[in-house]
Image (cartoon, rainbow, N blue to C red):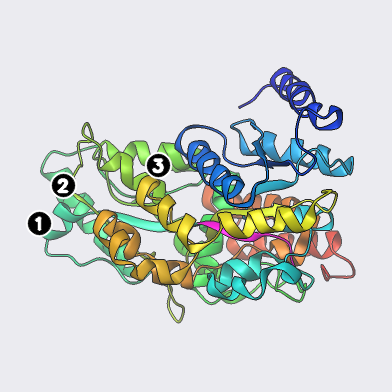
Amino acid sequence: MTRPSSRRRWWAGLLTALAGAATGTLRAEALKISCGAVGQELELCQQAAQQWARKTGHTVQVVATPNDASERLALFQQVLAARSDRIDVFQVDVVWPGLLASHLLDLRPYSQGIEQTHFASFVANNTVRGRLVAMPWLANAGLLFYRKDLLQKYGERVPLTWDELTATARRVMEAERAAGHARLWGYVWQGRAYEGLSCNALEWLASHGAGTVVAADGRVTVRNAHAAAALKTAASWVGSITPKAVLNYAEEEARGVFQAGNAVFMRNWPYAWAPAQGAESVIRGKVGVAALPGGAGGRPSATLGGESLAVSRYSRYPALAADLVLYLTSADVQKQRALVGAYNPTLPALYRDADIARSAPFIAELADTFTNAVARPTAATGRRYNQVSNQFWNAAHDVLAGTATPDEALVRLEATLQRLGRNGKWN
């Protein structure tokens, strides 16, 4: 994580680098974009931004940002709270539109309806009180990774429900342990008390038909029988098919267990595919990917993740900045990003693209997952989403740790969210 001193250095560097805009070093129509952080993500952003610059005759400066997402958000909030025009275009995480909406430009007057070609769930996530405050750029969603070789060995199919996953994981785990693989677990996921647990728990609830904690109209809906059943199922995994250590797992801890060959199933984001297939991976060629299971009476639900591009309301060139955003999120640029970096597009049509299907067949199989992805309640809760998520993951963690029953945790969670909201509603 970036230290406070690093944040101060970054902030000082940003002001120094951009000071030239006020002294004439840069052309008057120069735009500043903060996108990516390191490696290929930053490189592809720079390349596409320069393509736009050559096409339009304008200048684009890519502003470096800290690697850590929390540090990036804190810095973006500082820049926007100061109503600064030092950055025109921001790359924003999927949970940030609601937090930053009051500082972001409505893109609908510039988009000519192009947002309708993106995944509807992503557009809904980026629409706050009727304003399209960010354009989808990179899709992400929770997925089920599984050991193809072990399912084949025991004649098991990919589970379609959580009950099937529980039974299959237990059968394979017990059989393998009896054969000498004592460290094998059935299912690993993200159980630490942090945003990753909110993502997992939201998938459990939504797939059981339990809603999304706070509904789109602002009603607190988390206390219901379906939610209690979902949490009860998840708690039953801990210590049986899932190690108790999962209560401290984030994405990398879960991936480490799975990639070491010590789990049958794993819930994670698409990024876990590449390292699992790496040259030094002990499970290379043995991994399959599928949609997450559904609950009884529900359907498979994956929490929506990803990145978007937004324009600051304080930009001196809003129309120009919006044009840059629309170019970077266009089909041509997203296709190039998919071909070169295996980044998941936000345009359903690209999941049928023949070039992408040949170079990255894994991407082509994800369209349904993104179409049905469930968004976190950021639009309904706005700048207070972090409070909601914090209370949600703590309630889920209490159930998983056995310090509260699902009913007890949901009663307390409902009361807390009602108190934090306005007369029981969030908008």
Q: What residue type is labelled 1?
A: Lys
Tell me, for residue 41, which label it has, or none. none
Instruction: Examine the rendering and report whether any part of residue 207 can be seen.
Output: yes
Local secondary structure at mark 3:
helix
Label 1: which secondary element:
helix
* In-image side of 132 versus 363 (left or right): right
Seen at 53% across and 70% down, the residue is 119
- Res. 363 image quadrant: bottom left
**Counting other residues with Cα less than 10 Å from the Cα at mark 2, is it few (<14), some (14-19), or many (20 or more)?**
some
In this rendering, the label closer to the viewer, 2 or 1 = 1
Rounded to the nearest angstrom, the CA distance separating label 3 from label 2 is 19 Å
- Separation of marks 1 and 3 at Cα, in angstroms: 23 Å
What residue is shown at x 57% (from left), y 40% (from top)?
36
Which percent across, then down, holds residue 278?
25, 37
Give the residue type at disc 2: Glu
Q: Can the viewer see residue 95?
A: no
For residue 131, above or below residue 265: below
Circle 2 is placed at which residue position?
176
Q: Which mark is residue 153?
A: 1
Q: Give the range drawn in magenta.
A: 132-138
Residue shown at 63%/66% (left/top)?
A: 407
Image location of residue 81, percent across then percent down: 87, 43
Residue where numbered disc 3 is placed: 254
The residue tagged with tag 2: helix, strand or loop?
Answer: helix
**Which kind of residue does numbered mark 3 sit on?**
Ala
Is residue 244 or residue 114 the one in the foreground? 114
What is the quadrant of residue 344 in the picture? bottom left
Q: In this view, does 208 lie above or below 386?
A: below
Front in this rendered view, residue 116 or 144:
116
